[in-house]
Image (tube, rainbow, N blue to C red):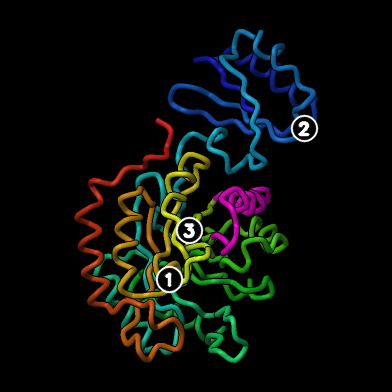
């Protein structure tokens, strides 16, 4: 339930309303905007009398919320959330590109790519230390050494780092990681999400291959229930009947999510398509549709990459894409955001 208060509500009356609502065993989340104040009620509100609340002078409107996600719901939080990723803001008009290799392979590789993507315009460095692979015989990443090499690249370039966690036993290794990525396979690992909610670190949460947008937001809700609202949502393609691409990139998810939530939304065109030549057009489409950022795989030698070479851009191709992105960004709109 959402209670919209009138302008400059009487403090004594507001205190009385809050006390009464708390006695109804609901949690109150207060949001103060430039023109109005909103009280978001989380819990069982079925027995709360809307007409009684509407009769109060300080109340302008009351709305019942049907969606099961409360903290992530834009109705509770009209202003876009800006996530601080090691000093780099994402969301609320702050567009960022996260770029780097699918997997960290060596010190020379990650340092070279980090310098190239930074020079081209990326502000955050991605790289897999722990790699989830369909085959148990495929390269699984350098693990602890991979994180050490990412930190070396951060020290040299100043770029905050983004890398994926596979299991909560690995969390102590992520102490200096700026953004923890939760991959598509772990989107509904609810125990992991609960624990990440207590970390207060930015979380990049990827949509599962066969999950709805509401299910994605419910996963974000698990993290937020633990007290961590620093979440970036990532659309990375879903599984459909089409087999011309690895997955089907749901561009409509950008505008849809913008209307459903205040959390920033980014796009991963690399994993969505699985084909390097399709990355640029899908990235540009995402920018035009109002995405808050992109996460793109870049490798200095894609044919010899240990992981996902066919979908990786060369540094030169990434530089060209970054230039095209800057050219169209002034024409991008957040069509789904309520105005």
The residue under the point 60% across, 48% down is 214
Residue count near mark 2 (Cα–Cα under 10 Å), binned few <14, some 14–19, many ≥20: few
The residue under the point 36% across, 87% down is 109
Q: Closer to the observer: label 2 or label 1?
A: 1
Give the Cα separation between the discs numbered 2 and 1.
Answer: 44 Å
Residue 142 colored magenta? no
**Does the image show residue 180?**
no
The residue tagged 2 is: 44
Q: Closer to the observer: label 1 or label 3?
A: 1
Q: Position of residue 306 (x, y in %)?
A: 45, 89
The residue tagged 1 is: 245
Dot 1 or dot 3: first in sequence order is 3
Highlighted range, magenta:
207-229
Q: Closer to the observer: label 2 or label 3?
A: 3
Q: Position of residue 149 (x, y in %)?
A: 45, 83
Q: Secondary structure at mark 2?
A: loop
The residue under the point 68% across, 31% down is 41
Q: Which quadrant: the N terminus? A: top right
Give the Cα separation between the discs numbered 1 and 3.
Answer: 15 Å
- Compared with 162, 50 (above or below) is above
Mark 2 touches mark 1? (CB < 8 Å): no
- Compared with 237, 76 (above or below) is above
Mark 1 touches mark 3? (CB < 8 Å): no
Q: Position of residue 324 (x, y in %)?
A: 21, 61
The residue tagged 3 is: 235
Q: Position of residue 196 (x, y in %)?
A: 64, 60
Dot 2 or dot 3: first in sequence order is 2
Residue count near mark 1 (Cα–Cα under 10 Å), binned few <14, some 14–19, many ≥20: some
Q: Secondary structure at mark 3?
A: strand
In screen coordinates, is 337 left or right of 227? left
């Amino acid at each position: 339930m959402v209670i919209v208060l009138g302008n400059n509500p009487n403090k004594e009356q507001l205190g009385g309303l809050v006390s009464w609502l708390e006695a109804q065993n609901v949690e109150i989340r207060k949001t103060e905007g430039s023109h109005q104040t909103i009280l978001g009620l989380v819990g069982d509100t079925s027995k709360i009398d809307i007409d009684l609340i509407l009769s109060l002078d300080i109340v302008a409107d009351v709305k019942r919320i049907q969606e099961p996600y409360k903290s992530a719901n834009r109705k509770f939080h009209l202003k876009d959330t800006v996530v601080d990723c090691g000093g780099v803001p994402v969301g609320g008009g702050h567009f960022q590109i996260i770029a780097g290799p699918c997997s960290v392979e060596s010190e020379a590789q990650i340092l070279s790519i980090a310098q190239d993507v930074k020079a081209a315009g990326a502000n955050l460095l991605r790289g897999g230390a722990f790699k989830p692979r369909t085959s148990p015989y495929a390269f699984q990443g350098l693990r602890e050494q991979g994180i050490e090499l990412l930190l070396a690249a951060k020290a040299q370039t100043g770029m905050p780092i983004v890398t994926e966690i596979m299991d909560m036993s690995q969390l102590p290794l992520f102490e200096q990681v700026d953004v923890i990525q939760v991959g598509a396979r772990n989107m509904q690992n609810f125990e992991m999400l609960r624990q990440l909610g207590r970390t207060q670190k930015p979380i990049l949460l990827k949509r599962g291959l066969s999950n709805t947008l509401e299910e994605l937001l419910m996963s974000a809700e698990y993290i937020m229930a633990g007290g961590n609202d620093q979440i970036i949502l990532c659309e990375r393609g879903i599984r459909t009947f089409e087999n011309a691409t690895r997955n089907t990139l749901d561009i409509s998810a950008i505008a849809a999510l913008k209307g459903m939530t205040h959390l920033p939304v980014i796009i991963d065109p690399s994993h969505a398509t699985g084909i390097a030549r399709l990355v640029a057009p899908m990235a540009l489409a995402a920018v035009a549709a109002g995405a808050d950022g992109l996460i793109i795989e870049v490798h200095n030698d894609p044919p010899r990459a240990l992981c996902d070479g066919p979908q990786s851009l060369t540094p030169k191709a990434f530089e060209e894409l970054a230039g095209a992105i800057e050219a169209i960004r002034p024409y991008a709109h957040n069509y789904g955001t309520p105005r």
